[in-house]
């Protein structure tokens, strides 16, 4: 660990790769935190209670109260429900059109920026590989051009560059890819839920 920390020092060859990889990881982590807050907190918290309360109001035909509840709830699925109920007088086609219009707005908001996190993970891996190649070039240059008394240290430095950048690239990429998988799973679940619940409400009001 101390050897890796030393690799960030400008006195160490290949330090540029270490800082660039770290910067890419921080950018990816920033997008990840924003997505976690939006998908797993803002778009999910209180969802089950809202759907249960909304369903009871629809079942008892308290449409005005159901619409008020949906408008007062800041969830993507609530906006879908509000669009459907507010257009119930226009029949199934108008309710479906209103549902589709809101869905086309809300679904991209759930998947936004997730691909950028994947790109940051890929860039981290490639930068680690680039640092590895640089370290190998440094090593081969040491074998070819350094005096015998300096070769051992130069070889050690070259291998340290190669291994350090590879390790940091993987340490950056792997957590980001795991989080991308979790975010994709949760966003897909919310999108499917909006489709399913929207269709059920339309069927019940048709």
Image: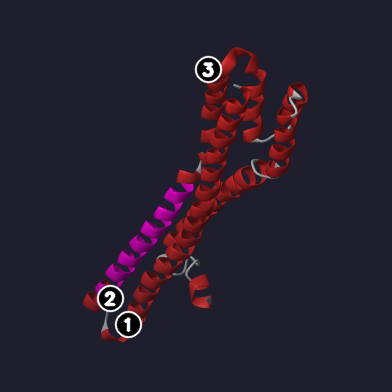
Residue extent of the magenta highlight: 116-140
Q: Earlier in the sequence, mark 3 or mark 2?
A: 3
Pointers 3 and 1 in contact (CB under 8 A)?
no
Q: What residue is drawn where x is 56% and y is 19%?
A: 92
Residue 135, compared with residue 146, is above or below; it is above
Mark 2–mark 1 Cα distance, whole angstroms, equals 8 Å
Q: On the image, which quarter does residue 35 sit in?
A: top right
Q: Position of residue 145 (x, y in %)?
A: 23, 75
Asked if the stretch drawn in magenta spans residue 136, the answer is yes
Q: Does residue 168 show up?
A: yes
Q: On the image, which quarter does residue 124 sit in?
A: bottom left
Residue 26, compared with residue 113, is above or below; it is below
Q: Does residue 13 show up?
A: no
Quadrant where the image shows the C terminus: top right
Asked if the stretch drawn in magenta spans residue 146, the answer is no
Which residue has dot 2 on it?
A: 142
Q: In the visual, does 133 lie left or right of 101?
A: left
Q: Earlier in the sequence, mark 2 or mark 1?
A: 2
Which residue has dot 3 on it?
A: 93
Q: In the visual, does 82 lie left or right of 60?
A: left
Q: What residue is drawn where x is 55% and y is 36%?
A: 196
Q: Earlier in the sequence, mark 3 or mark 1?
A: 3
For label 2, the SS is: helix
Pointers 2 and 1 in contact (CB under 8 A)?
yes
Q: Position of residue 140 (x, y in %)?
A: 25, 73
Which residue has dot 1 on it?
A: 150
């Amino acid at each position: 660990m101390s050897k890796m920390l030393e690799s960030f020092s400008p006195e160490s060859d290949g330090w540029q790769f270490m800082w660039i990889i770290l910067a890419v990881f921080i950018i990816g982590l920033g997008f990840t935190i924003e997505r976690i807050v939006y998908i797993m907190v803002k778009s999910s918290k209180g969802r089950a209670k809202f759907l249960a309360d909304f369903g009871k109001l629809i079942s008892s035909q308290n449409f005005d109260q159901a619409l008020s509840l949906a408008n007062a709830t800041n969830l993507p699925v609530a906006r879908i429900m509000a669009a459907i109920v507010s257009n119930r007088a226009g029949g199934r086609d108008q309710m479906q059109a209103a549902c589709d219009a809101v869905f086309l707005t809300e679904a991209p908001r759930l998947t936004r920026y997730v691909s950028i996190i994947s790109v940051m993970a890929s860039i981290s891996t490639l930068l680690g590989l680039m640092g590895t190649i640089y370290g190998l070039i440094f090593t081969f240059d040491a074998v070819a051009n350094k005096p015998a008394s300096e070769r051992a240290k130069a070889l050690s430095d070259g291998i340290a560059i190669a291994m350090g950048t590879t390790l940091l690239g993987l340490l950056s990429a792997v957590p980001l890819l795991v989080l991308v998988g979790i975010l994709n799973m949760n966003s897909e679940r919310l999108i499917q839920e909006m489709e399913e619940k929207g269709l059920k409400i339309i069927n019940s009001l048709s």
